[in-house]
Amino acid sequence: MAATDPLSTAADERRFDAATFDPTSSGPKGARWWREGGWRYLVGLLGVAFALMPAYFVVLASVSPVATLSGAQLVPRAVTLDNYRELFATTPFFTWLWNSIKIAGGAAFANMFLSAMAAYAFARLRFAGRRPGLLTILLVQMFPQLLANVAIFLFLVNISNYFPFMGFGTQLGLFLVYLGGALGTNTWLMKGFFDTVPKELDESALVDGATHGQIFTRIILPLPLPILVVAGLLSFIFLFNEFILASILLGQADANQTLATGLFRFIDQNYGQQWGPFAGGALIGSLPTLLLFLFLQRYIVSGLTAGGVKG
Amino acid sequence: MSNLPGAPVSFADRLADRLGAGSVTGLLLKFLFLGLVNALALYAILTLLPMREWTPLAVVVVATIAIDYVYLSKRTLPLKFLLPGTIALLIFQVYPVLYTAYIGFTNYGTGNVLDEQQAIDRIIADSITVPDDAIRYRSTPLQNDAGDLALLLEDPDGDLFLGTEDGLTLLEEGDIVGEGAARVVLDEFTPITLGDLGDRESEILAFSVPIAGEDVDELDLDLDVEADAISVQTFNTAAVAVQRLEYDEATGQIRDLEDGTVYTAIDGTFTAEDSSTLRPGFRDTIGFDNYRRVLTSPAIRGPFFRVFVWTFAFAILSVVTTFVLGLALALALNDPRMKLRRTTRSLLIVPYALPSFMTALIWQGLLNTSFGPINQILGVDIPWLTSQAFAGALPKFSVLLVNLWLGFGYMFLITTGALQAMPEEVKEAARVDGASGWQILRQITLPLLLVAVGPLLIASFAFNFNNFNTVFLLTGGGPPIQGTLTPAGHTDILISFSYRLAFAGGRGQDFGLAAAISTIIFFLVAIFSYIGFKRTAVLEEIN
C-alpha cells in the first residue's frame, strides 16, 4: 500500500525504514523521527488517556477502601473488595444484570428473526406493495419509540386491565414493546446482504422442490450468519442501553428493574454514599457490551464487505 | 422435497404441499405455531368478552383470522414472511405514534385521568354526605350465593331492615332464621365470613342502599332530612346519607340539588357559570390547547423556547465536536508505518463500547462538585453540573464534553474506515501535480470523506437530537430554569423535557402537553430526515 498519510507533504515522499521510528534516538535523528510520524504517538497517547481516564477512576473507586467519593486519589493506598460485597449485599445486582440480558437478548434475537424474514421477502419475492412497504419501514424509523413514551405507557396501563401479566410493570410487556422496533434499519441492512446472495442458489433449490420456508431457513439465513450475528449484537447493545421505556414501564419493584434503571435508582442522589459500590457495579455491568464490542470489532474493521458471502 | 415430477409422493407429503408447507416437519411446526396463536387468541377472547371490551376484542379476532388465513393459504407467500414483524410494528410502534398525536389533543394528566362516566360517578359519590343528625344503624354485611352484597340494618328503635342495591325492605319476625353467623335472611342472605370480609372490604365500604321517597313514607323511617341512601360507614354501622349533586343524562349537566347551581362540562371539567368547578375532571379532547399553551402560556413558552434552541445547539455541537476529534485522531493514526496502531484503535473506542447509561452515570459522579475525583484532583470546587450562571453555561459545556467523550470513538471508527477505503491514486496524482499536504487534505481528502460519512453525520444528528440518556442520566435536565411553572432545566432537550412533564414533574403529570411536545419533535425529525434522504438519494436506490 502506498503511504496513506494525508498530512505528509509533497516533499515527504521517502519511505521509512524501521530505524527512523526508533523513539530512543535523539538529536537531529529524533527531530526527524518526530516530524515524520513520531507526533502521531503523542496524539494517540493523549487520545487514549482521554478515553481511559474515567475508566481508571472507576476501577480505582471500586477497589478503594473508602466507600464515598471523598478521598479520591490518583493511586490507591490499599485494595479491597468491600465495595463489591456491599453492592451485592444491598442490591439485587445480578437480578438486574440477568433481567437486562434476558430482555435485551430475547428481544434482539426475536427482532433479528422477524427482520430477517421480512428482509427475505423484500429481497427475493416480487409482490404488490413491496416498494411502499420498504418506504413505510424507512418512514416509521424516523419516529423512534422513545418519542411515543407517553402513549406506550398509557397503552400498557390499559392492557393491564385485561391482561395483567403483560401490562404495566411486567418484563413481558417491556419485551413486547421492544419487538415493535423489529422492522427497521436492520431490515434494510439484511435486505442489502440477501441481495448479494446469488439468486441461482435458491432458484435451483426451487426447481428441486424446496419451499420458500426451506430456502429461507436452510440457504439464505446461514450464508450471511456473521452479519446477522453482528446486527443482532448491535441490537442487543442498543436495548441493553435503553433507559426511558424501561424506567416508565417496569414499575417500582426493585427486583423487576434492568441494570440501567436499577443502577440509576441506586446511585441517583446518592453519589456521596454509594460511589464505591456503584463503581463496582458499573465495571461488571460494562463487561457484557465491552466484550461483545471487542469481539465485534474484527467484523466491523475487517469490513462489512464480507457480507457478500460466496454462494 | 420428494415432489419432483414422477417421484413417488406420500399422502403426508401431498397434504403438506397442499397446505403450503415443504415437508412433514414443516407442516407440524406450522400447526404447532398456529395452534399456539389460536389458543392464545381464544384465551384473550374469553377474557375480553365478559368485560364487553369490543375494540380490543375486534383487534384480537381480526389479527387471529389474518394469521390463520396467511399461513394456511397458498396465495399469501410474501405475507408469510412479513406478517409477524408487521403486527409487532403496528401494535407497538405505529399505534403508539398515532396515539401520541391524539393524546396531544387531550387534557390527559393529573386531575383528568378518568373517563367521563367514571368522573361523573366519582363526583356524585363524593357529594353523598351524612348529616350530623342522621339516623344511624347497626349493620351486618350479608351476601347471597351469587355474591350480591346486602345489609342487615337495625335502627335505633330496634326495627330490622334488609338493604340491597335495589332498596330497603322491612323485616318481619320469621324472616330471619338462625343465630349469629348462621343466620339466614329471607332464605337467601347470610353474614359474610371474616375471610371474605377482608377480600371485599372496599366493595362493602362503598355499598349504599338507595331509598326512594315513597319507601321512606311507607317504612316510617322518621327521617327529618330528605334522604337518598343508607350508606355503609364502617363494617358494623351505616347511616342515612344525602346526595347533593345529581347528573342529568338528558342535558349532560350536573345539578346542585341544594342551591340549584348547574355545572356544564367544558374541556373535561364540570364548570358552573361563576367558573367554580367540580373535581375530578375527565379526559377530553381540547383541540389545539396544548399547542397554544406551548406558544402563548408565559410559564411554558419561555422554557420551551430555551429547550428548543438548546436541543438544536446540543445536537449540532455534539456532531461537530465528536466528528472533529474523531477525524483528527483518525488522520493522525492512519499511518501504516505506525506501531501499536491496532491497540491504540481498540483503546480509543472503549468509551463507545461501554453502555451509554453507565458512562453518563459515571460522569455524574466524576463531575460531582464536592466529592467528584476531578474537582478533588484539581483541588477546586467547580459546580460542573449545577451552576446556574450564564443560563447554565457550565452544565451545558459539561454535557457536551461528556457527549464528546461518548461519541468520538464512533466518529473515529467511521472516519478511519472511510479514509482507508479512499482511492490512493487521487491523492497520488495531486501530489505529483505539486499540491501540498494541507491542500490535499482540504480539497481532496475532506470532500471525499464527507460524501462517504455524510449520511452517518445526519443520522448522528438525529440520534443526538433525542439523546435522552446523556442528558437525563448526567444532569437530569438540570439545573432548573428559575421562575418557571414547568419542570424545565438548562440542559433539558425536548425529549427529556417532555419526559419530565409526563413522568417526573413533581407538579403532577401532564400527558397531554408531553404528547404535544413529542408530536412537535416528530415533525422536526420528519423535516430533517426528509432533507437528509433527499441529499443521500436513498429513495432512488430501492429496487
Image (cartoon, rainbow, N blue to C red):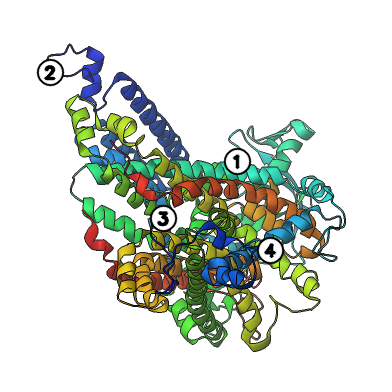
- Along the polypeptide, which appears first: circle 2 or circle 3? 2
Asked whether the residues under marks 2 and 3 belong to the same chain, the reply is: yes
Circle 4 residues within 10 Å: few <14, some 14–19, many ≥20: few
Identify the residue at the far left of this view: B6
Q: Which residue in the protein does label 2 denote?
A: B5
Q: CA separation, marks 4 and 3?
A: 39 Å
| Residue B127 at least partly seen | no
The structure residue drawn at horizontal position 78% and vertical position 32%, both measured from the top left corner, is B179
Q: Residue furthest front?
A: A28
Instruction: Tell me the distance, in whole angstroms, between the alpha carbons under discs 1 and 3.
Output: 43 Å
Residue A171 is labelled as none
User: x and y percent of residue A278 in the render?
Assistant: 74, 55
Q: Amino acid at mark 1?
A: Asp
Which-is-in-front pick, marks 2 and 3? 2
Placement of B524 over or under A151, stated as above or below: below
Q: Which mark is residue B93?
A: 3
